[in-house]
């Protein structure tokens, strides 16, 4: 670690690149997390719609069978 710090001291442009890469990694992680949350929410909504449709069909079948 000490050698890397010494190397970075002699090449100041590495610090900017390292910082940029770290910020991009955080941004990608945040976008990925939000994407997963959105996908999960969409699946829950789809399941709710499917359950409502199944309820409607069962109710309709019972009404027609009587």
Image (spheres, rainbow, N blue to C red):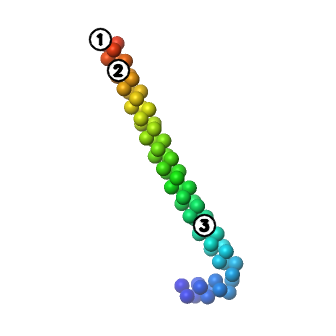
Per the rendering, the mark at residue 66 is 1
Q: Disc 2 on helix, strand or loop?
A: helix
> CB atoms at circles 2 and 3 under 8 Å apart?
no
Q: Quadrant of the C terminus?
A: top left
Q: Is residue 45 above or below residue 28?
A: above
- Label 2, label 3: how far apart the Cα atoms are: 54 Å
> Quick one: label 2 or label 1, which is nearer the N terminus?
2
Cα separation, mark 2 vs mark 1, equals 11 Å
Mark 1 residue element: loop
Left/right of residue 37 with respect to residue 6 in the rendered view: left
* Vertical placement of residue 63 versus 14, above or below: above
Disc 3 is placed on an element classified as helix
Density class for disc 2 (Cα within 10 Å; few <14, some 14-19, many ≥20) is few
Question: How many other residues sit within 10 Å of disc 3, few (<14), some (14-19) or many (≥20)?
Answer: few
Percent across and percent down for residue 52 are 40, 29
| Residue at x 38%, y 27% (from the top left corner) | 54
Q: How many marks?
A: 3
**First-in-chain label (1 vs 3):** 3
Q: Are marks 1 and 3 in contact (CB under 8 Å)?
A: no
Q: Which residue is mark 2?
A: 59
The picture places residue 15, in percent across and down from the top left corner, at 65, 77
**CA–CA distance between discs 1 and 3?**
65 Å
Residue 19 numbered tag: none
Q: Is residue 44 left or right of residue 62?
A: right
- In the rendered image of this protein, does residue 25 appear above or below residue 40? below
Task: Please report the residue visible at 34 percent of the width from the left and 12 percent of the height from the top.
Answer: 64
> Within 10 Å of the Cα at label 1, are there few (<14), some (14-19), or many (20+) other Cα atoms?
few
Which label number is shown at residue 23?
3
| In-front residue for pair 34/6 | 34
Q: Residue 5 appears at what percent x and percent y?
A: 59, 85
Residue shown at the point (61%, 88%) measured from the top left: 6
């Amino acid at each position: 670690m000490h050698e890397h710090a010494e190397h970075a001291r002699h090449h100041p442009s590495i610090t900017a690149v390292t910082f940029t890469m770290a910020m991009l990694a955080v941004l990608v992680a945040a976008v990925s997390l939000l994407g997963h949350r959105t996908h999960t929410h969409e699946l829950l909504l789809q399941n709710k719609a499917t359950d409502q449709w199944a309820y409607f069909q069962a109710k309709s079948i019972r009404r027609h069978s009587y």
